[in-house]
Image: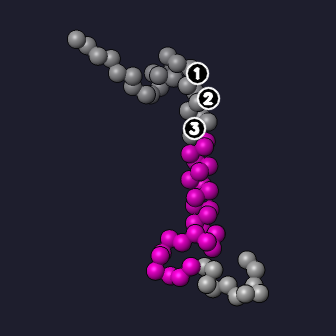
């Protein structure tokens, strides 16, 4: 009994060309998500990587806006 597996590669794109837009859209979404996560970690004060430091809202004065 021989079982064929569906290997995902260039052969699959030749056999099923309708996968090309799907893979392109999913790849673009994943890259955009990763880019936004990096942007948020680098620039947003409410995102903390090091939990030992206090929350960012404790450093803001009552009349100061961010």
Secondary structure found at label 2? helix
| Residue displayed at 56% across by 32% down | 23
Q: x, y (%) of residue 22?
A: 58, 30
Q: What separation in Å lies between label 1 and label 3 (alpha carbons)? A: 13 Å
Q: In this view, does 11 lie above or below 42?
A: above
**51 lies left or right of 37:** left
- In percent of the image, x 48 and y 75: which residue is there? 50
Helix, strand, or loop for circle 1?
Answer: loop
Q: Residue furthest top?
A: 1
Q: Name the residue under label 3.
A: 26
Residue with the mark numbered 1: 18
Residue 42 among those drawn in magenta: yes
Residue 19 lies, in percent from the top left, at 55, 25
What is the C-alpha distance between the residues marked 2 and 1?
7 Å
> What residue appears at the point 63 percent right and 80 percent down from the top-left corner?
57
Label 1 neighbourhood size at 10 Å, few (<14), some (14-19), many (20+)?
few
Sequence order check: which comes first, mark 1 or mark 3? 1
Q: Are marks 2 and 1 in contact (CB under 8 Å)?
A: yes
As drawn, 50 above or below 20:
below
Disc 3 on helix, strand or loop? helix
Q: In which quarter of the image is residue 29?
A: top right
Q: Name the residue under label 2.
A: 21
Q: Where is residue 65 in the image (x, y as percent from the top left)?
A: 76, 80
């Amino acid at each position: 009994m021989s079982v064929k597996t569906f290997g995902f590669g260039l052969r699959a794109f030749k056999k099923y060309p309708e996968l090309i837009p799907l893979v392109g859209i999913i790849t673009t979404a994943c890259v955009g998500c990763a880019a936004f996560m990096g942007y948020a970690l680098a620039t947003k004060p409410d995102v903390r990587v090091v939990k030992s430091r206090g929350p960012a809202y404790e450093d803001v004065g009552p009349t100061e806006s961010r």
